Each structure stands twice: as C-alpha cells, then as structure tokens.
Amino acid sequence: ALYSNNLNSSLAKSGDLINITLEVSEQIYNATLQIFDTETSMTESNNTAYANITVLQNSPNGLAAFNITAYDGAGNEFNITQNDASANVIIDTANPTLSNLTIYS
C-alpha cells in the first residue's frame, strides 16, 4: 500500500507522511527503502514491512518514486519499485502563485 496522510491520500505536501507497506509471501529481512535520494530501514513484522516518510519542503515534486530492497530467509533478494505499486502519491511542495490580479473600484 502507498498513501499519504493528506486529506487526498494520493497527494502530499511538506509535513505530510507517506506510508509504504509491503506484504509478501515469506518472512521479510533487512528491508530498506530508498526515496527522495535517502535510504532508510523499514520496520519488519513477519511477511510485512512498512515505513512512514515525512515530506520535506525540499523533497522533489512529482511522483513519489521509491525502491525497496529486501531478503527472504534463504537470502534471496527482491526489489519493488514505484512501477510495481498499485497506487501513486504525488508530491507538491510548491505554493500556488498568482498569475493575474485585477483590482476594480
């Protein structure tokens, strides 16, 4: 699962959390998440791994692209990328800008 805690769970602004949850058929070991050019360990519980990432003001705008690397009990590596996700989160940290203002009196 991939979603944010924003009112619109497919969007995230600065300060929002992005939740990534991975469920596989076997026990997961050494799961790491790479997102926003940062690598972090994921919390593991049996065949599930998850992480909550805070969107920062300098986080790149656009699709929240990620890569997860994990291992099974035998040491077989598997990778999950944004392309494998069934949902997307779009990062938008840019403030709206006024393009035209007309004042009448």
Image: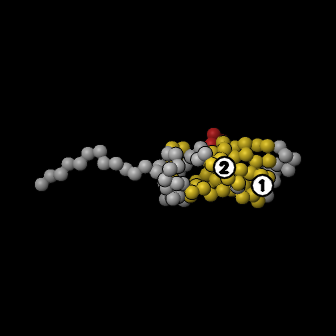
Kind of element beneath mark 2 = strand
Q: Mark 2 points at which residue?
A: 39
User: Residue type at mark 1?
Assistant: Asn
Q: Which mark is residue 47?
A: 1
Residue displayed at 81% across by 51% down: 26
Specify the color scheme. Answer: secondary structure
Q: Where is residue 62 in the image (x, y as percent from the top left)?
A: 51, 44
Mark 2, Cα crowd under 10 Å, few <14 / some 14-19 / many 20+, is few
Left or right: 93 in relation to 1: left
Residue displayed at 80% across by 47% down: 71
Q: Residue 14 carries which label?
A: none
Which quadrant, please, contains the C terminus?
bottom left
Mark 1, Cα crowd under 10 Å, few <14 / some 14-19 / many 20+, is some
Q: In which quarter of the image is residue 52?
A: bottom right
Q: Nearer the viewer, mark 2 or mark 1?
A: 2
User: Residue type at mark 2?
Assistant: Glu
Left or right: 38 in relation to 6: right
